[in-house]
Image (tube, rainbow, N blue to C red):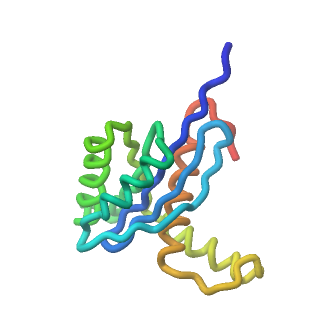
Amino acid sequence: MPAPATRTVLSFDYGLRRIGVAVGNTLTGTAEALATIDAFDGEPDWHAIGRCVAEWRPAAIVVGVPYNMAGPNAAITTAALKFADQLGEQYGIEVHRVDERLSSREAEDELRERRRSGSKTRRVRRGEVDREAARILLLQWLRAQPGEPAR
């Protein structure tokens, strides 16, 4: 049986002002924080997103969707779902939606811990949190894939 093909995957942590971006692959099950892209009143910088897609040529895209833990979805949920739909339509790439309710909190905690341990010397910035959240979302998705090793 041949080994499964390695697939590059881009991940986006959508926000109304910033969008975190990460890249990973299905062979190693790892992900790396890449960039933070500006959004203007919820409208993504499509040129910057296009450059990421052109550079990494992903086989799939993961988008974090902030579902509301208390019940009805918030406006940000609707905006993130619209963003995911637009990515799929614009680039013709399969888009996976991942529940990202707590990813930004986890990203912030992880970056602060790196700062406390001395592996990160600068204070935690918002753009870093967005990129790290995109990385965490991608790792979550990669771990959920059938046949992927648990890491």
78 left or right, relative to 22: left
| Foreground residue among 104 and 122 | 122
Picture coordinates of residue 93, whole percent (x, y): 37, 38
60 left or right, relative to 118: left
Residue 31 vertical placement versus 117 (above, below): above
Residue 138 vertical placement versus 109 (above, below): above
Where residue 148 sits, quadrant-wise, is top right
Where residue 70 sits, quadrant-wise, is bottom left
> Image quadrant for the N terminus?
top right
Picture coordinates of residue 106, whole percent (x, y): 56, 68
Residue drawn at x 70%, y 79% is 120
Residue drawn at x 44%, y 54% is 52
Residue lying farthest top?
1
Residue 102 vertical placement versus 111 (above, below): above
| Foreground residue among 98 and 22 | 22
Picture coordinates of residue 37, whole percent (x, y): 40, 67
Label total for image = 0
Picture coordinates of residue 87, whole percent (x, y): 31, 48
Residue drawn at x 70%, y 84% is 121
151 left or right, relative to 55: right
Residue drawn at x 65%, y 49% is 30
Residue lying farthest right?
118
Where residue 46 sits, quadrant-wise, is bottom left
